[in-house]
Amino acid sequence: MVDFDALLKKSLGAANDRFKKADEELRSFVVAGNDSLEKATHGRLKLKLSRVKESSEGINYRLDLINSADKKFEQICGFQVPISGYPIKRGRADELGYIITTGELQGNRELEEYFKTCFQIRIRHLS
């Protein structure tokens, strides 16, 4: 006889592990990016990742660039970490916290490349 409880737990556990991995990797890139940005701007600019919506589809985040001198902020992008993990959707977070998707990040390597590109553009913009 099939043990449906065990199958469900195993299935949910694997999905939960994939979600945790994608979510942790996104957060670690934000922390590393923030550390680099603060160092490069002598604390003038910071990154803030805010949870803006949680649903059965996943968690939506908004990544803002904050100017510590005047407390103004600018949205860099929005992310949705699906409950199934990768691919992470990227785009813009609207006022209700929905992500207007412009692309997907398939894994850690694409996430790293995306963050490098974002910071190169931002630093050029500030120079």
Image (cartoon, rainbow, N blue to C red):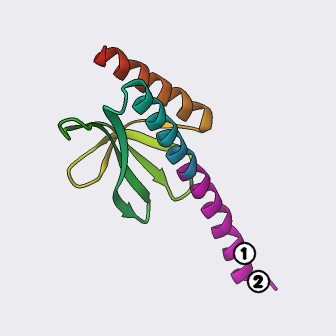
As helix, strand or loop, the secondary structure at mark 2 comes to loop
Q: What stretch is highlighted in magenta?
A: 1-23
Q: Residue furthest bottom?
A: 1
Q: Mark 2 points at which residue?
A: 3
**Residue at x 42% of width, y 49% of height:** 80
Task: Give the x, y percent position of residue 61.
Answer: 37, 50
The residue closer to the viewer here, 30 or 71, is 71
- Mark 2, Cα crowd under 10 Å, few <14 / some 14-19 / many 20+, is few
As measured in the structure, the alpha-carbon distance from the residue carrying label 1 to the one carrying label 2 is: 6 Å
Q: In this view, does 81 lie to the left or right of 76?
A: right
| Figure quadrant of residue 90 | top left
What amino acid is found at the position of numbered circle 1 in the picture? Leu
Q: In this view, does 81 lie above or below 36?
A: below
Viewer-side residue, 24 vs 81: 24
Q: Which amino acid does label 2 sit on?
A: Asp
The residue sitting at 61% across, 63% down in the picture is: 16
The reply to whether the magenta stretch includes residue 28 is: no
Residue at image coords 71%, 71%: 10
Check the image and report above or below for 109 versus 120.
below
> Contact (CB < 8 A) between labels 1 and 2?
yes
| Residue lying furthest front | 42
Mark drawn on residue 7: 1
Comparing 118 with 32, the one in front is: 32
Viewport quadrant of the C terminus: top left
Q: Does the magenta stretch include residue 15?
A: yes
